[in-house]
Amino acid sequence: MAEGVQPLIQLSDLGKVFYTEELETHALSGVHLDIDRGEFVSIAGPSGCGKSTLLSIIGLLDTATAGEYQLDGEPVQGLSVGDRARIRNEAIGFIFQAFNLIGDLTVYENVELPLVYRDMRGSERKTRVQAALERVGMVHREKHFPAQLSGGQQQRVAVARAIVGEPLILLADEPTGNLDSTNGKAVMDLLGELHDDGATVCMVTHDPRYADLAERTVHLFDGRIVDEESG
Amino acid sequence: MAPFQFALSWRLALRHFIKSPASYLYGAVALALGLGSATLLFSLVQGLTAPLPVPNGEHVLRVVVVDPIRGHAHVTIDDFHAWRMHAGSFESIAAVAVSERRVGTRRGDFPARVAHTTADMFPLLGVEPMLGRWPAEADGTTIAIGEDLWATTFEGDPAVLGRAVRLDNEVAIVVGVMPSGFRFPRKQDIWQVVAADSPRLANGEVVSRLKHGVSRMAASQEFTELMQAARTDREGVPATATARLIGFTEERGDRAEHAIGIALLLVVLGLVLLSCSNVSALLLERNLARTRTLALHQALGARPAQIALQTLVEALLIGGLGGILGAAVAHVGLLFLTTTLADNLTYFWTRLELDVASVAFAGALSLVVAVLCGALPAWRAVRTDAGRTLAEQAQAIHGSRRTPVSWVLVNAQMAFAVAVVVAAVGLATILVQKPWEIDLTAEFSGERVVAAQIAFEDDAIVANGSRVEVLERMLERVRAFPGVQSATVSMGDWLASRARSFGLRRVAFGDEPFGDDRGVPILYITPGFIDTFAINLVEGRPFDARDTGSDAGSADVAIVTEEFVRARLPDQASVGRRFRLDQGGGRERAFRKAASCRTWP
């Protein structure tokens, strides 16, 4: 991290406890993590170690029960539901393992969705959607529905949806988990290209091949960061 | 929220609908039952309370007289003259009475409903004849006919003007044809002008058009004061009856009407709520099945209002479909009621139909119901835990499918809703038919009983008080007809009119004072009444010739119902008991009870 530059993501002593009936589950404990602008960080670890929970908290889909979280220098703990939604819409792009495209919307409409929630004008939406689809090579499929696409194509559309709003960070949760190796590699190549163009990427993965593509890998075990290594 | 977000929500909802229409239609049918019965009720009230369709019809009011003891009472010709001469709150005032006459033309005889009015009725109403002029001659020699009669009996011949027709034994000249649909005051075919003091106006109605700016209350007050002053002068005792000005379709509802109306309202309200809960459950179930999609929308930055909008739009789609189906249900119900109740619709302008107001009501109610249905599912959708939901990789959401028990419950609700709709239509029918008012003959052995209404229109008979003699002669002649076993006369139009129009009199036994109750209905009859209707007496004897005399000092006799005995003489011998009737104005009449009967004449 460059001296004096504010990290994009700054987690300090972050903890997350789930309360179910009489049981307390400590999903995360004492997590300290900084992610700089333009960095490609992967989070690795065995199942149930808290990777997805950490990603949910970074993506403002969940809140920590302890510690502090600053996004782009602003504390995001205690924000209202509406403010968290606005920040998610403007600053964060999600890529999921299961693609999570909306089956009733076309490829174009799926990619357009974050911009619709941003109240953006139609002409600007169109320009951005076209650019995002071109970026992932899916313009020719814009009128198709997700069910008409292969898994690899769906994930490319999901990447287009994640980048269309020009977010501060891309959060990818096992983006290759549902893909064969060829499609998985294609998606990872795409993420690599986005990173090369300046995107900040934080990716959760089991797969050591893809974890190694990141500049830095954070290893989680039982909710704690146990190791960090630079690629 | 930007319009394109509404567009997106509608697009999604319509695609869901096209993909799986069954669940939407199921919800729409559930709502249609509630919305349909509510719209039916609205249209019914609209139709039955529509004002007189003449220019500024809301200012044209009936004058009714209310006796504090007997309830509704007749307006007398003297009352009419008092108001006409001295009241200042109206622009014009007129009287009208109706009768049925046989009309004789060159083509034959047929019955027709005739309105006898004072000459100022037509200017008061502000309705111009379609052809010719208003009849103006107070001797009854000119008439106007209705457009329907003109088109059918006179085949739309413009030369009908000036043609002579026979009304019973009179001859009148047709001078005008009234516009299509005009059948004032109820369903009349012919209008004949009579003098303001004509006996034909007895038992008629007084109609007035209020001056602008004069309230009903002020006018009623003025009419009451004038009427009471005139009656007090005439009768020598203080008059207590009051006059009220009301619209033609504003009836004074009695308890039974109110009870049925409230029951109907509650049934419809319950049905709407039941439909709402059904659709709400449907939407909740849909949202449960797509929790992951809702979470995804949140992850992409949808604000709570935007998440809620999607569910509300789906509720609106179901509500809209339900509203359309509901309007169809109401339309069918109204057609059924119109067909069934045609004879019970008193006024010529009463239309039980799905008009613009009814459609607007259905639309507005659909909107409200849709928002109500969607509110809870929308709130639950907003509260979706996006982080946890998206962390679950499995696409299938367990528990989203309906269990057999759930299906049974929902279908039971639907069956109940259908039953409630049928009950609502039944109650509406009862409300309009008012069987408790007119179906008195159901208590009697009505087979082979023929009834006729008698009206005295010969001024001489009315003037010299010889009505009793005329009736006795008539009864003798009727009894002499072959096949007639017995004949009777009752005072008042009791077979055709409403129970509450019977005279109400307070009753007291011995020397006890009269109570504060409204009294009991009294019917004056001739001795043959009990035989004619084959009424079973519980005890005592029927009337006979002994009871028709007018010996000084002898008490009148009465037959009372078992219900009356149970209420007023519990566990006491009733035959032979004497009681007094309050005749109003401080006058009393003594009676001796001759019998108790099982049924109520």
Image: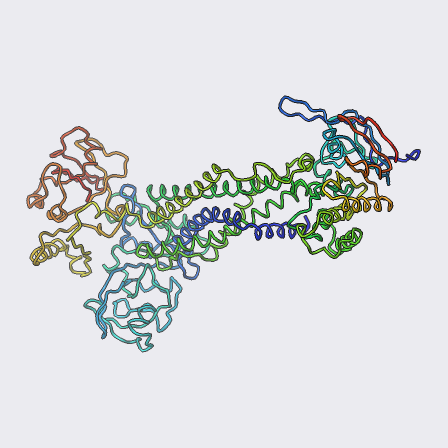
Q: How is the image coloured?
A: rainbow
Q: Is residue B225 visible?
A: no
Q: Closer to the camera, A54 or A97?
A: A97
Q: Is residue A66 visible?
A: yes
Q: Closer to the camera, B154 or B508?
A: B154
Whether residue B224 sits left or right of residue B31 in the image: it is left
Q: Residue furthest top?
A: A22
Q: Closer to the camera, B339 or B109?
A: B339
- Residue at 54% in and 40% down: B401
B158 versus B553 height, above or below = below
What is the quadrant of residue A62 in the picture? Answer: top right
- x, y percent for residue B545: 6, 46
What is the quadrant of residue B160 in the picture? Answer: bottom left
Q: How many marks?
A: 0
- x, y percent for residue A96: 73, 41
- x, y percent for residue B18: 57, 53
Whether residue A105 sits left or right of residue B114 in the image: it is right
- x, y percent for residue A42: 81, 36
- Residue at 32% in and 76% down: B157
Q: Closer to the camera, B456 or B100?
A: B100
Q: Residue furthest right?
A: A3
B107 versus B237 height, above or below = below
- Quadrant where the C terminus of chain B sits is top left
